[in-house]
Each structure stands twice: as structure tokens, then as C-alpha cells.
Image (cartoon, rainbow, N blue to C red):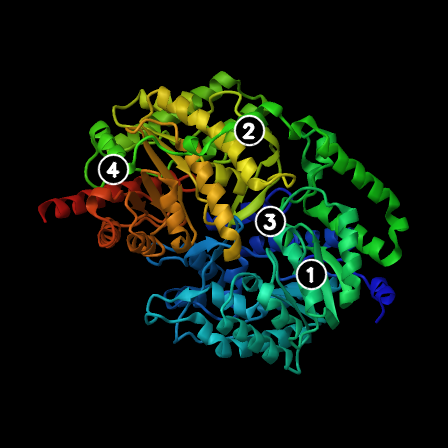
Amino acid sequence: MTAKSAAAAVRATVHGYPRQGPDRELKKAIEGYWKGRGTAHALRETAAGIRRANLGQLADAGLHEVPTGDFSYYDHVLDTSVMVGAIPARHRAAVDADALDGYFAMARGTQNCAPLEMTKWFDTNYHYLVPELGPDTVFAADSTKQVGELREALALGLAARPVLVGPVTYLLLAKPAPDAPAGFDPLTLLDRLLPVYGEVLADLRAAGAEWVQLDEPALVQDRTPAELNAAARAYRDLGGLTDRPRLLVASYFDRLGEALPVLATAPVEGLALDFTGPAAANLDALAAVGGLPGKCLIAGVVNGRNIWVNDLSASLATLGTLLGLADRVDVGASCSLLHVPLDTAAERDIEPQILRWLAFARQKTAEIATLAKGLAQGTDTIAAELAANRADLASRAGSPITHDPAVRARTAAFTAFDARRSYPYRQRAAAQRAHLKLPLLPTTTIGSFPQTGELRAARADLRAGRIDPAEYEERIRAEIQEVIAFQEKAGIDVLVHGEAERNDMVQHFAEQLTGYLATQHGWVQSYGTRYVRPPILAGDISRPGPMTVRWTSYAQSLTTKPVKGMLTGPVTMLAWSFIRDDQPVGETARQVALALRDEVNDLETAGTSVIQVDEPALRETLPLRAADRPDYLTWATEAFRLTTGGVRPDTQIHTHMCYAEFGDIVQAIDDLDADVISLEAARSHMQVARELAAHGYPREAGPGVYDIHSPRVPSTDEAADLLRTGLKAIPAERLWVNPDCGLKTRGWPEVRASLEHLVAAAREVRREVSTD
């Protein structure tokens, strides 16, 4: 096929779409079902309505092929576990009794049954449920969901492409089941898994699928020869099936590297590649392997992870180059649009000119359709769109929001000395012990306490003018009083004020810093029914005034125990925002760090002796390729130290991380030079404590003993057993006792019971250690 005829065949498509509905209808329906306010039938009807609306939006935008199967009640990796029958033994009875309740039990756990472990989806803030596999795992195909959602789209007269997590990525994301032998590798189950995928593909073909997409993002990471051979074998076998649709293998988030020739030569009909950010290297790599003769290419030229308008002219240039490298080139986003909000049209508080700089999911689908039209029919047919796009790009580049000379001068003046504590850790630790006088195995929490319906209603009433600021502040004051009183009664050693005034740990600060934009409806799924509104880092960052001092000082006035000051660290402020793409990320991180440094210094001046600077995103933002990591870790750890480097030695600096694989950043954790780090550990059975010990981590640590992402209440014995496991890796004089993460999403009854059990466990183990 010639380049000209290839252009004529151009189609527009996407990998996936936001699931929640315009007003988070799915979240409300699921949580209503959990609380018994809605039926399973009502939940399914709500979900079906959202899917129909999404498909209609995609078709109306001009997409020629829509994805199916990307919708989920909780997580698409958990959906894959159900599809292949990989149900942990402890959940099998619940799934057999009621498939929907069993599904949610795997995600959230029950009082008597632990949930699946949860961690971050590559370098995003989306969380997935980690499959548990062992040598005794028996796979069995269940394509009910995938076939049902395909038929919904076909019934609407749409060309539809089911999207599945690929078998290699599924196994590479899995972990050995608790009863698996040491050293077991889930990838050894590939030959057992492939026939199950074959059955699902046959079912989808029978239901009318012409194409099926198999997502293999794990192949953009550094992979061993054995793993690459497994990928080659997987697609040789699946491609060799006779009863199957055409296969499209998709990768995203980075360049494919050594996996590209493996997939380019596989007997599949198409590839979907990312051509944004570091994945732009896929263009030269594709040319180097001779392109994709006889295959379709879906070119991901619209960034599916950020919210800035696309440079349409630049994307058209990339697409024009790609036309000669594949039999057919279609236009798509770099990845699923799950990672961006739904629609900018809902934003009424952002200046209209600035709003034109932004593209959420609906705007990105329009960009994709425009690019496909221009590629197929010529740029003259989209001349108006190109002119408007150039004007929007120029408006952003020339805006005073993006350039503050004072901020840039201050950032340029910082030195390496500013990013170091004035005393080494051993001297600081002695000063802090003398100042704080904490017991062995001190107890604390991560920061937030339950955000009750009353608190959320108070914020809504304030925004709507139903109450005045004074009344709102009185409600916050009363909540802080309750939180402090409970912690004192429970016997917690280092208290928090509970963050009642904070809507989100990033948004709260973004709304008080210059250079950020806040959205009203920019919801993005983080996990399950947890949605966040990432702020938009649009310009240079500074802090007009103190952000947390007032309420932290008020909480401290209510108790003689230390109250932690709570801040979100610079890396997490970037990772959980949509950041600017017009300057190096490290430069933006320094701006945020200097703004936070001012807040740290003001807290210390106000008498706060313990200050926690949370960095849960440090691991999540780690580049997927090892070659890119040293530069990232250099500026990321430097930004943290720049935030905390100006305090006295007797001020104790804490940090917190959660729900990620920490083993490959232990040195970076050490380089932060925090005095205390708290980490998720309950679901992973203290794995991180062992990793810290193996590294020789010299400072204090609090591996969590209470899994806050589950409604179950851990018993005192359970928490004590986890503590004893932690003590095998971390000596008692350096071990803290705390939950895995903040308590914002939990209810007060379970929080009270869980923290009481946590304190009781600490006292029990403290007695054991003291009598040894």
C-alpha cells in the first residue's frame, strides 16, 4: 500500500476512556451498593448507562473505532484476574457465592479475609490490584464481561475493539501467592495462561470482534532476555491461532527499546505505540527495524496523561513520517484517557483564555479526530483548527503566569549547601530524643483523619454561601478538638490535627500557591471509588503566605504531646498535579521546594517540633527505564532536602510513602536524609522493613501495621504480630508504630477501633522488648 492510500485509510481511536461519569455517578452507585442503599441491579444499570454515554461521546467526536472492556467497577487488572480465573483460594468461596460481592472482597477485603495487595500502575497515580499466583494456580476463561461490553457497542452500530491486559504484562505484574515456594516466578505460568487467552479471543471473535487489543506496557521497562523470549513466544502462539480476531499489541508510557523488534516481527496484525515524551524515541527505533510492513500502526501522538492542548502541527509532522513505516497509520492517544479528567466544558472558574490551553478527555478525542482528518484529507481541511491551535499555544507561551522573574532568580541562587541538614543524623537523633522524650516504639498516624459527610457538607455550604467563613472555621475547630481528644485518650504518642480543613493533600497546597490552577470537576480515578482532582501547575511557583501554621498551632495548643506539622513534598506536588511541559521538571521541583521550605521554617518558628513532608509519589514517578533514573533521583531527593534543610537539629523531619515497590529506591530513601520514614507494609507483610534492613538503612522507620485501604479492623494480635516481624529487621529503638497511610477515606468507628488496637499492640510488644 502506498503512503497516499495509507493516509486515505486513516482512522481515529483511543485505548480507553474515563469511567466515572460526568458527576462521578459510578462512585456514588458503588458506594451506595456497599452501604446497602442500592441493589446490584441498580449498580449494573448505572454502569451500563455510563458506558453508553461514553460510547456516544466517542462516536460523536468522530472516532472511527471505540474501545470496549476498559470499563471497570474497581480495576482493570482485577478484571483480568477474574477473566482468567486467578481467584486467590481465600476468596474463592465468596466469588462462588456472589460474583460481585466476591469481586469487591478481593479489592477491599473483609473482616476475616485480607484483600489483594495494591500498588501503582507503572509511573502513574492509578493503583491496581496485584494478582497472586503460584505453581498450583489453575486458570479458567471467563469472558462474560468482555463479551457483554463488546455487544453493547456493536448494538449501537459502532466499530468496537475490545481491550485486554496482555498475558505477559499480567504475569510480570503478578506476585507469588503467600503459599508459593521461595523464588517462584509467575512468568513460568505463561504456557498455562496462553490457552485461556486463546479461549477469550475465540469468544470475542464469535461475538463480533474484528480486532482485539492486548496491552503490554510492561515491555517498555528494562526486560531480561528470558522475558523478551517469553513475549516472543506469547505472540507467536496467540498469533498462530486460527480462531481469533486480528490482534493489536499496545505499549505506552515509554519507549519499547529492545522489545520493539520482538513485537514488530510477531505474527500479529498491528501495534499501538506511544510517541509522546520519552516514548518519542519510538519513531527512530521503528525506522531502524524497517517499520511495520503489512501491519497497522496506531500512533499515540496525543498525550493521554497530561492536559495541555496538543501541538497539532508537530503531531502532523510525526504522523507524516510514520505513513511510510506501516501499511496503515491510525491516530490515537498515547495511552488510555483514564488518566485525565472528562471535559473542560464543566470548568466555570478558569479564565476562558487559559481554559483554551487545556484538553481533557473529550477535547483530546476531538484533537485525535482532527489529526486523522488532516492526515487523510490534507491540512487544508483543518486550516481553521490549526490556526486556533497556534494561537492557543502562543497565548500560553507568552503569558505572565508562566514566567515570574523573582521566582526564577531565587531558584537560580540556591546552592547544594541549602539542600543539607546542618548536623549529621546521629547528632540530630540524640537531640530529638532529648527534646521529644518519646517511648520505645512510639505511635503516630500518617496525618489525615476521617473526612466525614459533615465536613464535606460544610465545605460545600461555604462554597455555596450557606454559611460564612467564621461558621466554617468553628466547625473545623470543633473537628480538630475531637481528633486531638481521641488521640490523647487512645494513648497515641505523636499527634496530628487530622487535616479537617484539607480537601486533598495536593490541592490544598496548590490553591494557596501562585502558579497553580484548580479545577472544580477535574476528577481522575486513583483507585476503586477514590477520585482526585489533580491541580494544574501552569506557571512559576511561590508562596504568598503561611498555609498550615494556624491550624497546626491551634492543635498544639490543645495538648502537651507533640503535634506533627503536615506538608506534601515537592515530588508529590508534581506527580499528583498536571505539570507544565515547557521547562525541565527538576526546575519546577526546585520552585515548589523553595515555597515549601518557607512553610517548614514558619512551622518550626511557631513551635512545631515534628514536621512530616510526605513523598508517597517518589517511587511512582521513578522513570520506567533504569538509564533515566539517576537524573530523576538526583533532582527529586535534592528537592526534598531543599524543603527540609533549614531546620534545627532537634526538629524531627518525617516523610511518608505508600503503595509502591520500594526495593529499587532504598538508596534514594536514604538520600532524603529524613529522620523518620513511614511506609506501607501491612498488605506486603513487612517486606519493606526487610528491604530497609538489607540496605542498612540507618534512621528510624514506621512500616505500617494497619491497612487503611480496607474496611476491616485489624486485631491487636494481628498488629502485634506485624510489629514482631518488623522487629526482626529494624531494632526497637528505631521502629515506629503507625498505619499504612492516612485515614481520610475511613469511617470513625473503624478508625477508633483500629487505632486502639494499634496502641495496644505497641504496648504489648514494648513490654516484650523491655523484658528481653
Q: Residue 42's x, y, as percent? A: 57, 53
Q: Which residue is mark 4?
A: 426
Q: Residue 363's x, y, as percent? A: 73, 45
What residue do we see at 72% from left, 62% from top? 298
Q: Nearer the viewer, residue 239 or 39?
A: 239
Q: CA distance from mark 4 to mark 2?
A: 37 Å
Label 3 residue SS: helix
Image: 755 above or below 8: above
Q: Which residue is mark 2?
A: 511
Q: CA distance from mark 3 to mark 1?
A: 27 Å
Q: Which residue is mark 1?
A: 284
Q: Nearer the viewer, residue 702 or 75?
A: 702
Q: Quadrant of the N terminus?
A: bottom right
Q: Residues within 10 Å of mark 2 (few under 14, many from 20)?
A: some
Q: In the rendered structure, which amino acid carries the disc numbered 4?
A: Arg
Mark found first going from the N terminus, 4 or 2:
4
- Look at the numbered discs 4 and 2 and tell me whether their residues touch, using CB distance below 8 Å: no
Label 4 residue SS: helix
